Image (spheres, rainbow, N blue to C red):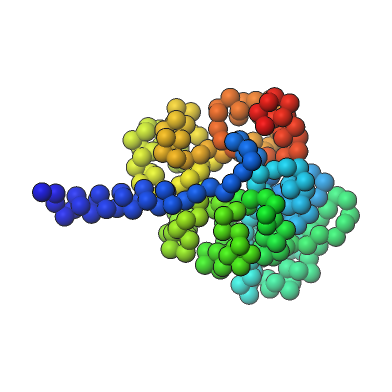
Amino acid sequence: MLSKATNLLFLSLFMSLSAVAQQVLPETKHKLVVIAHRGSHINVPENTLAAAREAINAGADYVEVDLRTTKDGHLVVLHDATVDRTTNGAGKVSTMTLDEVKHLQVFNRNKKTNKIPEFKELLAVCKDKINIYLDFKAADAAETWKQIQAVGMQKQVIVYLNKESDYQEWQKVAPNVPLMSSLPKDIDTKEKLTGFLEKMPLKIVDNLPHPHLLSALNEAGVQVWLDVQSATEGPASWKVALEKRVQGLQTDQPAALIKYLQDNNVR
């Protein structure tokens, strides 16, 4: 007869595996997905509605956006904790009201006016056109999920977690949402990987600290989407990433990457 402690261990493991089973990735047309990092922002500013539209026009499978919260509790799309780098303003977005954020102008090469969008505005642009890779920077999971539900995009979103505590929040609010994070660098064996996934079940990871773990991850139902965006991004770096046989690539050049994949019969 099994001890009470053993029974609890098996129950915990079963619940963890069930959580993974319930998480279903959004549908895509392509086996290898292309993620537009902060939108397609070569000709328009990052994390704007224009960048999301450009990602859609480029044919990307996902647009990656960053989520933060204003002083008065509104969800906005912005990568940095401050508005200094990307706008004509200064200060932390968490100390600004939505009205103050709305009055900022996002820097833009083509001189057209762009604003920091509310999350609900971004959702409206993307609905039924492109999936969302949501980098969950600083926000409330319940409010985020409420806005996703309001537009009927429950099956079009994956959530990237930057800290372990966010995992518990998302499990409470939306246990079926596919979750993504990074593997710790010390995960170098299948046994360590299994232990990590039992603690924090994921559907996607964005790194591969040890190439031999790819098969173990895929066997566990976990995909690997690598970041290929960099100052030197191009065919050489794309070739290296493709040789790793991963399932997704996040890029600053979605249109060029898609053409490269098409030219090489990968898409």
Q: In which quarter of the image is residue 107?
A: bottom right
Residue plotted at (56% across, 51% down): 158
Number of marks: 0
Left or right, 57 with respect to 76, comes to right
User: Taking 60 as reference, is 72 above or below it?
Assistant: below
Residue plotted at (70% across, 43% down): 60
Residue plotted at (37% across, 51% down): 18
Towards the viewer: 228 or 242: 242
Q: In which quarter of the image is residue 251?
A: top right
Q: Is residue 178 in view from this perspective?
A: yes
**Residue at the left extreme?**
1
Q: In which quarter of the image is residue 217?
A: top left
Residue 51 locus on image (x, y percent): 76, 51
Residue 6 locus on image (x, y percent): 19, 50
User: Taking 224 as reference, is 52 above or below it?
Assistant: below
Residue 199 locus on image (x, y percent): 36, 49
**Residue at the right extreme?**
111
| Quadrant where the C terminus is found in the figure | top right
Residue 83 locus on image (x, y percent): 71, 60
Residue plotted at (76% across, 52% down): 53
Q: Is residue 237 in view from this perspective?
A: no
User: Taking 13 as reference, is 185 above or below it?
Assistant: above
Towards the viewer: 132 or 241: 132
Left or right, 223 with respect to 249, comes to left
